[in-house]
């Protein structure tokens, strides 16, 4: 890690040891309140959004309820490929998650589903984005590629954010702190450290 990465890792580690992050593993905690970056985006109207990693559609539905979205790209290959090292990476789980996501989000007419890997999907998005949420493969090389490629698509003043900035996924911490230093843009963590975000 570079210095920024070590500071971030130390901060998350302290919260973990002191057990001051009781909701870190509660994915629904993102619906409990308006996160800081969501409050910022609430000042914008008719925004264009991309979410990488839709799974069962819980977070996408939260975004639909909390933001004024004109169009949202929902990106997920629903593929249990070998390098996706999560316990949900099974063919049956992927199939069930995709069906659940479509069921939860079918009432929204502003969605565009892209059933592709995120780097392939980025080539199909030919518009600037106001907001990107990264929650796909959490290994360092994948997070790094996602945030670098989708940062380019952000409008000035747009937000790139993501999930699992935690000790379980140190690759997320490393990739985020690297981009922050390269672009000289401050990153923020919230929701007990499970969310990170940066403004362009």
Image: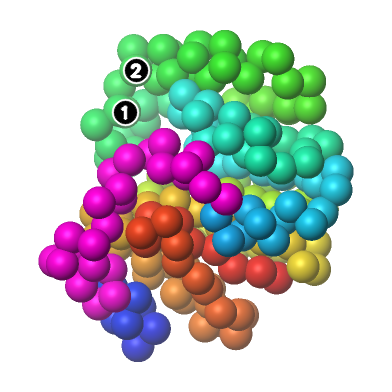
On screen, residue 61 above or below 167: above
Quarter location, residue 112: top right
**Which residue reaches farthest left?**
17
Q: Position of residue 198 (x, y in %)?
A: 59, 68
**Which residue reaches farthest bottom?**
3
Which is more toward the observer, 120 or 152?
A: 152
Count neighbours of disc 1 (C-alpha within 10 A) and say few if under 14, some if 14 to 19, many if 20 or more.
some
Which residue occupies 23% across, 62% down? 20
Secondary-structure class at tag 1: loop
Disc marking residue 2: none
Count neighbours of disc 2 (C-alpha within 10 A) and say few if under 14, some if 14 to 19, many if 20 or more.
some
Q: Are marks 2 and 1 in contact (CB under 8 Å)?
A: yes
Judging by the rendered image, the residue that carries numbered circle 1 is 89
Q: Position of residue 80 (x, y in %)?
A: 36, 26
Quarter location, residue 81: top left
Quarter location, residue 97: top left
Is residue 31 rendered to the left or right of residue 6?
right
Confirm whether residue 2 shows in the render. Answer: no
Asked whether 23 falls inside the magenta stretch, the response is yes
Judging by the rendered image, the residue that carries numbered circle 2 is 93
Q: Position of residue 137 (x, y in %)?
A: 41, 44
How many circles with numbers are drawn on the protein? Answer: 2
Which residue occupies 57% across, 11% down? 103
On screen, residue 15 above or below 85: below
Is residue 62 rendered to the left or right of residue 173?
right
Give the magenta part as a residue range.
10-34
Which residue occupies 71% across, 42% down? 67
**Which residue reaches farthest front?**
33
Is residue 10 rendered to the left or right of residue 75?
left
Q: Position of residue 74 (x, y in %)?
A: 63, 32
Asked whether 200 falls inside the magenta stretch, the response is no
Which residue occupies 67% across, 33% down? 64
């Amino acid at each position: 890690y570079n210095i920024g990465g070590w500071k971030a890792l130390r901060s998350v580690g302290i919260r973990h040891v002191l057990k001051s992050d009781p909701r870190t593993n509660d994915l629904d905690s993102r619906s409990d309140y308006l996160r800081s970056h969501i409050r910022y985006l609430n000042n914008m109207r008719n925004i264009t959004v991309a979410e990488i990693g839709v799974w069962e559609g819980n977070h996408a539905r939260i975004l639909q309820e909390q933001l004024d979205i004109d169009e949202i790209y929902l990106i997920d290959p629903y593929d249990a490929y070998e390098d996706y090292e999560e316990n949900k990476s099974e063919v049956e789980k992927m199939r069930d998650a995709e069906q659940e996501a479509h069921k939860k989000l079918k009432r929204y007419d502003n969605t565009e589903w892209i059933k592709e890997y995120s780097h392939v999907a980025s080539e199909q998005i030919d518009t600037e984005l106001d907001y990107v949420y990264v929650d796909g493969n959490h290994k360092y090389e994948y997070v790094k590629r996602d945030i670098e490629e989708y940062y380019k698509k952000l409008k000035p003043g747009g937000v790139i954010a993501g999930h699992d900035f935690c000790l379980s996924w140190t690759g997320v911490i490393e990739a985020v702190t690297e981009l922050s230093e390269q672009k000289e843009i401050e990153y923020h963590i919230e929701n007990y450290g499970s969310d990170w975000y940066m403004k362009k």
